[in-house]
Image (spheres, rainbow, N blue to C red):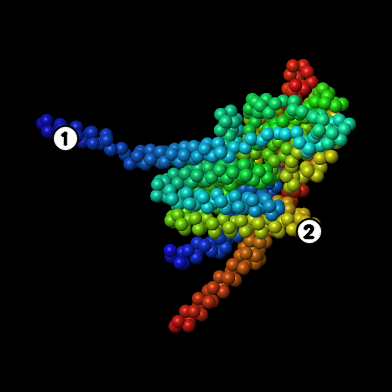
């Protein structure tokens, strides 16, 4: 009788130790997928360390040309550059922090915030925001000038894909948005749209402007002064 | 190496062209072939991802269980696409800026998953790499052909071809033309084989 | 009220003026593959709408999380896993509750994972600004935009199915049968759609 019981116990143990084939399969599948996914993520993390791009904004000739056109300092571009008429209103770290706080990723973000630091327009309260957004046709980088009271002064183009319809219509767009105050995305879109076939990129264009409006509002409002 | 298999694989990009014969990967072909630079950039990036994915998947083909092969391939291809995007952003930013949202779309390019499923998962690494190269070059040629044509036609004043509608039509015409030429080639091959067998007899 | 008008604008834009297939020329592969029969076309359109809406909403939130965790480079991987999971779920649900739809879609159901239209919407959606509106409203707009893109895709499929049903009969030269003529037809429809831009 004890032998019978032993065999029975042995059989039970054996059955418990052997998993059903379908469960084993499912576990194997899940394991392989997890390993592949985790390896991929780790590989990407490693690549990201080496291939990360940190764009350092500079006040170069091109920037000064655009800023000078948006709010003329009365001097020409060379003088404005040499005399330091324009300077950063927010440090790159502050801009990065603002981007992070507002949860905008690499597809759209503020690059730099400028102000007039010398010359006629010093402390005039105008904030120039360089912002970029990526759309269907590629990346658009604009500099938007916003007055201290939230009025749009105009936009200048830092970089725009050649396929982008709006590159040919900046003057018309400027004419439309100038002197408009505290616009919302819904109000801005029809002002910018001029009949292009890739409407989605209107959004990238508008996003860049809206980002600029948002941060300029905070820059102007912080510590009561015009600009930081 | 088996000579016939080598030849067939190497010529796959031409006789089995992913765009004109297999009719895969049409989305980027129409959307980003408005000028030759974009077309070349996207074609080259896709080709690189295709070759790498073919090699990787072929070397892992015995390890990945059959049931989860599609999700596994998709993960691998997505990771490779991310790598290419990081690479382009760092070393060729002008391409990254003009291709924009279409670099992530390489991850869902039917050609890459299609070749992974149809070829790389069933063949040795060497052949898989060759197939990737051949198909990649075939895709590059197709998208550049379309891109160059559309740009030329646009510059010549026929700007309808630069629009998506024109892209559809032009691709349809090219497809029909390619079919026609391929048919001629196959008929000529058949005739040659027939006369060959007649001689032998 | 302004929100309602904005949403209506988004829907109309996505379905008519910037239709994902005819204006943005993505989603062509399933378009050519499925548009031969009307019922599989409708089925695919509905499935894509469903997956697109859900995937966009989920990815919108996940993307914000990725940024906060400094893991933005994992975005492609995350999006595609979300879409794959949703398609797998759809597969199971359809198999159980609607076998007719399941068989109508056939091999094209798992291929929804690699649908360019869905992936482009998800990639664009997470950057669709609405920055000034904050996450809550942005999410709402995202859902409607993705839904509208899906409907636009459905419309494109239905139109193509209607057109292709007829071309069996026409006298088309042999090299042009099948895909070439389908592409040319799509192009002509796209031309017609570009007339909507006047709105």
> x%, y% of residue A165?
77, 45
Q: CA distance from mark 2 to mark 1?
A: 90 Å
Instruction: Say which of A173 and B20 sits in front.
Output: A173
> x%, y% of residue B92?
64, 45
Disc 1: which chain? A
Query: Looking at the image, can residue A159 be seen?
Result: yes
**Is B200 on the left or on the right of A65, as rendered?**
left
The residue lying at 58 percent from left, 47 percent from top is: B106
User: Could you say which disc has been placed on residue B156 in the image?
Assistant: 2
The residue lying at 73 percent from left, 53 percent from top is: B162
Query: Looking at the image, can residue A147 be seen?
Result: no
User: Could you say which disc has been placed on residue C64 in the image?
Assistant: none
> x%, y% of residue A150?
80, 25
> x%, y% of residue B126?
46, 57
**Residue that protrudes farthest toward the top in the picture:** A224
Q: Let me know if marks 2 and 1 both belong to one chain.
A: no
Asked if the residue under mark 1 is in contact with the one under mark 2, i.e. CB atoms within 8 Å, the reply is no
**Residue that protrudes farthest toward the right in the picture:** A74
Q: Residues within 10 Å of mark 2 (few under 14, many from 20)?
A: few
Asked which quadrant contains residue A113, the reply is top right
Image vertical order of residue A24 relative to residue C164, above or below: above
Report helix, strand or loop for mark 2.
Answer: loop
Report helix, strand or loop for mark 1.
Answer: helix
Quarter of the image containing the C terminus of chain A? top right
| Residue of label 1 | A7
**Is A119 on the left or on the right of C27, as rendered?**
right
Image vertical order of residue C194 relative to residue A34, above or below: below
């Amino acid at each position: 009788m004890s032998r019978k019981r032993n065999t029975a116990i042995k059989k039970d143990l054996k059955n418990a130790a052997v998993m059903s084939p379908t469960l084993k399969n499912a576990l194997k599948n899940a394991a392989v997928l997890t390993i592949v996914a985790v390896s991929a993520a780790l590989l990407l993390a490693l690549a990201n360390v080496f291939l990360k791009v940190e764009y350092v904004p500079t006040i170069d000739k091109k920037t000064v040309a655009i800023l000078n056109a948006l709010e003329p300092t009365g001097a020409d571009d060379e003088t404005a550059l040499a005399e330091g008429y324009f300077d950063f209103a927010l440090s790159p770290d502050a801009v990065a922090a603002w981007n992070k706080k507002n949860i905008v990723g690499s597809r759209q973000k503020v690059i730099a915030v400028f102000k007039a630091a010398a010359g006629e327009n010093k402390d005039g309260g105008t904030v120039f925001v360089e912002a970029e957004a990526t759309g269907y046709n590629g990346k658009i980088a604009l500099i938007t000038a916003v007055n201290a009271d939230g009025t749009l002064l105009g936009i200048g183009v830092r970089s725009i894909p050649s396929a982008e319809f709006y590159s040919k219509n900046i003057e018309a767009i400027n004419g439309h948005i100038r002197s408009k105050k505290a616009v919302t995305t819904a109000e801005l879109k029809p002002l910018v749209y001029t009949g292009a076939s890739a409407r989605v990129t209107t959004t990238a264009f508008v996003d860049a402007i809206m980002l600029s409006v948002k941060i300029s509002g905070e820059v102007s409002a912080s510590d009561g002064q015009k600009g930081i | 190496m088996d000579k016939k298999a080598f030849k067939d694989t190497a010529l796959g990009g031409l006789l089995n062209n992913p765009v004109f014969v297999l009719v895969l990967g049409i989305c980027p072909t129409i959307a980003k072939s408005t000028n030759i630079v974009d077309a070349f950039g996207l074609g080259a990036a896709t080709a690189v991802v295709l070759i790498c994915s073919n090699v990787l998947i072929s070397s892992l083909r015995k390890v990945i269980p059959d049931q989860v092969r599609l999700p596994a391939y998709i993960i691998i291809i997505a990771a490779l696409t991310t790598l290419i995007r990081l690479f382009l952003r760092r070393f060729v930013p002008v391409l990254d800026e003009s291709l924009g949202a279409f670099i992530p779309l390489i991850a869902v390019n039917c050609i890459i998953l299609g070749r992974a499923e149809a070829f790389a998962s069933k063949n040795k690494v060497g052949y898989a790499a060759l197939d990737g190269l051949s198909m990649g070059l075939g895709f590059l040629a197709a998208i550049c052909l379309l891109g160059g044509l559309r740009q030329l036609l646009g510059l010549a004043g026929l700007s309808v071809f630069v629009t998506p509608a024109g892209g559809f039509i032009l691709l349809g015409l090219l497809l029909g033309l390619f079919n026609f030429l391929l048919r001629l080639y196959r008929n000529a091959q058949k005739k040659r084989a027939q006369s060959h067998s007649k001689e032998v007899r | 009220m302004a929100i309602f008008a904005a949403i209506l604008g988004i829907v109309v834009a996505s379905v008519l003026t910037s239709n994902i297939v005819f204006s943005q020329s993505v989603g062509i592969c399933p378009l050519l593959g499925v548009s031969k029969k009307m019922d599989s076309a409708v089925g695919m359109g509905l499935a894509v709408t469903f997956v697109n809406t859900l995937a966009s909403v989920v990815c919108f939130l996940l993307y914000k999380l990725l940024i906060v965790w400094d893991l933005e480079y994992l975005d492609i991987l995350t999006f595609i896993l979300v879409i794959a999971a949703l398609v797998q779920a759809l597969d199971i649900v359809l198999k159980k509750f609607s076998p007719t739809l399941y068989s109508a879609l056939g091999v094209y159901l798992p291929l929804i994972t690699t649908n360019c239209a869905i992936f482009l919407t998800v990639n664009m959606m997470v950057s669709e600004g609405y920055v000034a509106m904050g996450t809550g409203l942005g999410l709402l707009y995202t859902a409607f935009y993705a839904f509208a893109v899906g409907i636009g895709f459905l419309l494109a499929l239905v139109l193509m199915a209607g057109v292709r049903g007829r071309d069996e009969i026409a006298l088309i030269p042999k090299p042009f049968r099948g895909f070439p003529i389908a592409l040319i037809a799509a192009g002509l429809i796209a031309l017609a759609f570009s007339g909507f831009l006047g709105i």
